[in-house]
Image (tube, grey):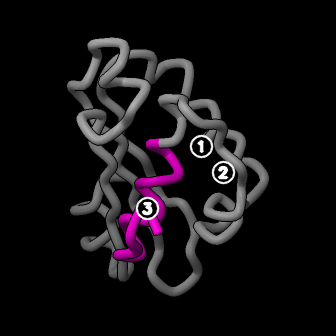
Amino acid sequence: MAGNTSKAQGLEIKVGISRASCNGKAIASGESEGFVKVILCSKTGELLGAHMLGSEVTEMINGYIVGRQLEATDLDIAHTIFPHPTLSEMMHSAILSAWKEPLDS
């Protein structure tokens, strides 16, 4: 679901973005263009949608698909361990970005 669609349906949303240019694996592999963007329901933490652009994103989108099927919330995803260094860390960072949390603390 796109952010403007969510707003049109009267949902309060929060959006998080993680850029490949901030991901160690993407930088090391020379594939630092792209991003992961999440759209979350502000009230419930439900993952309403995700946009991914860049190298290997077709290998990562499955994570959010499984999360939707299991009705995982942003908190569930945030508490999931994402190996380091991997491109999939951007999925975790996007959730933290929606919360306006520091990514490295």
- Residue 38, picture quadrant: bottom left
Q: Position of residue 68 (x, y in %)?
A: 66, 51
Point out which mark residue 104 bears.
3
Up the image or down, 74 lies above or below 84; here it is below
Is there CB contact under 8 Å for labels 2 and 1? yes
Callout 3 amino acid: Asp
Is there CB contact under 8 Å for labels 3 and 2? no
Task: Characterize the local packing of mark 2: few (<14), some (14-19) or many (20 or more) Cα atoms within 10 angstroms.
Answer: some
Pointer 3 or 1: first along the chain: 1
Q: Which residue is mark 2?
A: 68
Q: Position of residue 80 (x, y in %)?
A: 71, 55
Closest to the camera, between mark 3 and mark 1, is 3
Q: Position of residue 39 (x, y in %)?
A: 39, 60
Callout 2 amino acid: Arg
Q: Which residue is mark 1?
A: 64
Task: Characterize the local packing of mark 3: few (<14), some (14-19) or many (20 or more) Cα atoms within 10 angstroms.
Answer: few
Q: Is residue 94 left or right of residue 18?
A: right
Which residue is most to the bottom?
Answer: 43
Where disc 2 sits, the SS reads: helix
Task: Characterize the local packing of mark 1: few (<14), some (14-19) or many (20 or more) Cα atoms within 10 angstroms.
Answer: some
- Per the rendered image, the range of residues in magenta is 90-105
Q: Is residue 60 left or right of residue 26?
A: right
Q: Position of residue 83 (x, y in %)?
A: 66, 37
Where disc 3 sits, the SS reads: loop
